[in-house]
């Protein structure tokens, strides 16, 4: 039994030991890799069939010339990636793999790799070392921000980055030889050899070209292009107040600024240099004018027969072209073109005015204007056509030359006209008027020329007539009856100076013709109206009248302005039949007198002109309660006549500013007479005027006191310059007023 229990105990202890060992293994497996190994998130492992006892570890460190770097690391076996992950900022990563041979690859711009063998249970360290390339860029103005690329020896681009203006672009590359390039308009390149674990700095130095555009008008906005061996490599807008800046690989280029055409310049630049380049255009300013002044038109510029630019010429301005210096043809287009050869110089402005002749066409028939259509022909070729309005003209601007002008109604009136630069040639096309009527009923009238060609046809109403407008000349008329086969025919010659009436009769068939001569234009003037009938010398006078054409044909009139039976001015104009206009004349009448003014035979009207020194008289009458009266005449210059009467108690004496003499009646008369005067009669009360001189002064109440008389003398007698020549009787104005006040009080007490 003891042996039995011993064996049972031993088996129990053995089972317990195996269980504890299994728990330990499970705990170890669930705890994950040992410290320093990659986590499942960092590492991808594809050969998990090996047991723990059969695996080993690969410990990878990735670095470059600037220290540890983050790279993507792969473990490759037989061309297959069995593990991979990113090295952290410290550049390290570990992989647990099966024992065997592997290739470890670290990837940055390109890759660095090593072959390793992993033993069972062993740890294999791997160092993968890149070279570092740092690229910066500069130009004439300092640091710039281009784009850097790295190429292998086969010309394949490996990587690219922007170079910050204040930093470098950093590339981690496998040791070897490369081409570094920084690109702006074109690229600056350098060949570099890189060594593992070292940093190689490279500076790419551009040349700078600053392009401005100038002209005869100063700086202008343009567009600049840079060409290298004929190939455009860059282009930018040149601002009006600045430059277009280009960064270029040192070398020789062609810079071009573009307007209507291009100004070009060859330029050679060196690294780190800034070259200022101004491309200067010539300027031509084109205006257009005709007989009536400046007009709106369209200007084109031609070079060797090829149009290179075109612009509208405004009616009140110019069309401005900036061109490369040289020779051109400028053409301004209306019905046809006025052209000029231009020779332009850089930086200069050339003003050119293209002058047309003006042709105005109006259409009339018999006694009135009509609407028509006019065409202009040059050597048989139609160059323009316009409607002739009923109440106006069709205006054509033409290159100075000879043309054929045609106005068309049923047929056309043709006239050869010559136009001169800057002048207006008016042409009136006058048609003959034919009125056709039927004696009884209606019909249809056809007009034929002498060649038998039908010119026009119209229905003739039962009441009224059909009116034809035709080129003066011989015609045949055929009128068909409205309600029968009857036809009346006849022939006649039409004239522009008369109206022709043709009456068709069908029983017998006949056409009777009568004519009425048209009265020439005749003008009547009426409603003479001056702007004033009374005014002062030097004032302006306007005189107007209405003129009416009461004749049968349009025409031109001349109005005459007449002053005192003498024609002093004329004005001319044109009016159609029954049209009227207002004519106005203005003048300045400098001298006083009566003027008879009239326009073209109208009954004259008189305008009275007075001198500036003349006026009417204003009289004021004032009655006072004073016991003593004095009358004074004062001079003034009013312009109206007014009579004012009333009662006043004013008692202060007044005198004229002019020197005066006193009459026995007490009336003071101004010694300095003027044409315009104002007479004023005033009655004043002077209680203390004991000596009868009309003034209460020291001679009245202290005639024997020397002290009072001396004081009166000091105040002046009216001739002293210090008192302004104004008479100050007695003690002066202040004492006089006080005295008058006392006198007034005494008078009141007496009452």
Image (cartoon, helix red, strand yellow):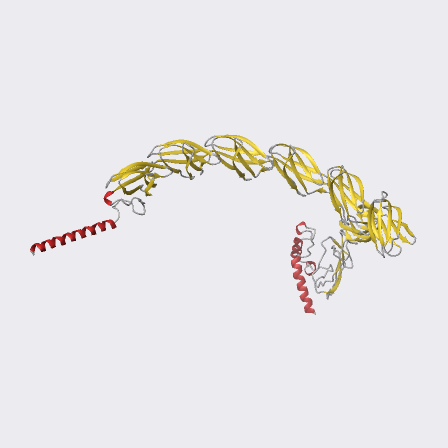
Q: Where is residue 68 in the image (x, y as percent from the top left)?
A: 32, 39
Relative height, residue 142 to residue 562 (above, below): above
Determine whether, in the image, residue 725 is placed left or right of residue 572: left
Q: Which residue is drawn at 70% across and 58% down?
A: 699
- The quarter of the picture where residue 83 lies is top left
Q: Position of residue 510 (x, y in %)?
A: 91, 51
Q: Residue at x 17, y 51 (%)?
A: 18
- The quarter of the picture where residue 125 lies is top left
Camera-side residue of 96 and 558: 96
Q: Looking at the image, can residue 277 be seen?
A: yes
Determine whether, in the image, residue 271 is placed left or right of residue 598: left
Q: How many marks?
A: 0
Extreme right residue here?
508
Q: Position of residue 616 (x, y in %)?
A: 77, 56
Indicate the quadrant containing the C terminus: top left, top right, bottom left or bottom right: bottom right
Camera-side residue of 78 and 628: 78
Extreme bottom residue here?
751
Q: Residue at x 24, y 43 (%)?
A: 54
Indicate the quadrant containing the N terminus: top left, top right, bottom left or bottom right: bottom left
Relative height, residue 256 to residue 728 (above, below): above
Determine whether, in the image, residue 6 is placed left or right of residue 167: left
Q: Where is residue 558 in the image (x, y as percent from the top left)?
A: 82, 46
Q: Looking at the image, can residue 560 be seen?
A: no
Determine whether, in the image, residue 148 is placed left or right of residue 403: left
């Amino acid at each position: 039994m003891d042996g039995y229990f011993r064996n049972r105990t031993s088996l129990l202890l053995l089972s317990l030991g195996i269980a504890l060992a299994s728990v330990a293994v499970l705990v170890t497996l669930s705890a994950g890799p040992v410290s320093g190994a990659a986590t499942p998130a960092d590492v991808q492992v594809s050969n998990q069939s090996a047991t723990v006892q059969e695996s080993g570890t690969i410990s990878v460190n990735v670095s470059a010339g600037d220290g540890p770097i983050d790279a993507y690391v792969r473990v490759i076996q037989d061309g297959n990636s069995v593990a991979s992950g990113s090295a952290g900022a410290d550049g390290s990563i570990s992989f647990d793999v099966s024992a065997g041979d592997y290739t470890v690859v670290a990837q940055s711009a390109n890759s660095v790799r090593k072959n390793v063998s992993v033993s069972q249970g062993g740890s294999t360290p791997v160092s993968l070392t890149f070279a570092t390339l740092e690229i910066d860029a500069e130009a004439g103005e300092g640091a710039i921000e281009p784009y850097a690329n790295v190429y292998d020896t086969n010309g394949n681009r490996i990587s690219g980055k922007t170079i910050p203006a204040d930093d470098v672009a950093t590339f981690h590359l496998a040791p070897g030889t490369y081409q570094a390039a920084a690109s702006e308009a074109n690229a600056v390149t350098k060949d570099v050899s890189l060594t593992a674990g070292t940093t190689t700095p490279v500076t790419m130095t551009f040349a700078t070209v600053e392009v401005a555009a100038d002209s005869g008008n100063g700086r202008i906005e343009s567009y600049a292009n840079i060409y290298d061996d004929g190939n455009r490599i860059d282009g930018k807008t040149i601002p009006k107040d600045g430059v277009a800046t280009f960064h270029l690989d040192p070398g020789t280029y062609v810079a071009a600024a573009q307007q209507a055409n291009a100004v070009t310049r060859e330029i050679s630049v060196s690294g780190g240099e800034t070259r200022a380049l101004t491309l200067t255009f010539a300027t031509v300013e084109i205006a257009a004018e005709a007989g009536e002044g400046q007009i709106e038109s369209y200007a084109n510029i031609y070079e060797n027969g090829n149009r290179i630019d075109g612009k509208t010429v405004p009616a009140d301005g110019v069309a401005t072209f900036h061109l490369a210096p040289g020779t051109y043809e400028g053409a301004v287009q209306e019905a046809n073109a006025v052209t000029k050869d231009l020779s332009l110089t850089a930086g200069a402005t050339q003003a050119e005015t293209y002058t047309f002749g003006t042709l105005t066409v109006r259409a009339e028939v018999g006694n009135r204007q009509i609407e028509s259509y006019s065409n202009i022909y040059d050597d048989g070729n139609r160059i323009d056509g316009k409607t002739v309005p009923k109440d106006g003209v069709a205006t054509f601007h033409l290159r100075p030359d000879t043309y054929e002008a045609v106005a068309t109604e049923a047929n056309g009136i043709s006239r050869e006209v010559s136009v001169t630069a800057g002048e207006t040639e008016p042409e009136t096309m006058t048609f003959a008027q034919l009125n056709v009527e039927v004696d009884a009923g209606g019909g249809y009238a056809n007009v034929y020329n002498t060649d038998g060609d039908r010119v026009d046809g119209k229905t003739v109403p039962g009441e009224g007539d059909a009116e034809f407008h035709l080129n003066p000349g011989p015609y045949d008329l055929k009128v068909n009856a409205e309600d029968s086969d009857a036809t009346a025919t006849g022939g006649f010659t039409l004239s522009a100076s008369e109206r022709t009436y043709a009456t068709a009769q069908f029983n017998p068939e006949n056409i009777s013709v009568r004519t009425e001569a048209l009265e020439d234009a005749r003008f009547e003037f009426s409603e003479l109206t001056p702007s004033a009938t009374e005014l002062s010398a030097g004032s302006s006078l306007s005189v107007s009248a209405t003129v009416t054409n009461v004749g049968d044909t349009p025409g031109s009139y001349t109005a005459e302005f007449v002053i005192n039976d003498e024609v002093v001015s004329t004005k001319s104009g044109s009016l159609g039949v029954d049209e009227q206009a207002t004519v106005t004349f203005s003048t300045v009448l400098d001298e006083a007198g009566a003027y008879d003014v009239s326009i073209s035979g109208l009954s004259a009207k008189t305008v009275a002109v007075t001198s500036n020194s003349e006026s009417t008289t204003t009289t004021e009458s004032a009655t006072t309660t004073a016991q003593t009266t004095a009358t004074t005449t004062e001079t003034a210059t009013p312009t109206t006549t007014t009579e004012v009467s009333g009662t006043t108690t004013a008692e202060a004496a007044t005198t004229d500013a002019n020197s005066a003499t006193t009459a026995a009646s007490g009336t003071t008369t101004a010694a300095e007479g003027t044409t315009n005067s104002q007479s004023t009669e005033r009655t004043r009360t002077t209680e203390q005027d004991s000596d009868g001189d009309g003034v209460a002064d020291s001679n009245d109440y202290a005639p024997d006191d020397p002290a009072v008389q001396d004081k009166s003398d000091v105040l002046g007698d009216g001739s002293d310059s210090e008192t302004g020549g104004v008479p100050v009787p007695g003690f002066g104005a202040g004492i006089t007023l006080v005295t008058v006040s006392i006198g007034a009080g005494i008078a009141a007490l007496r009452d």
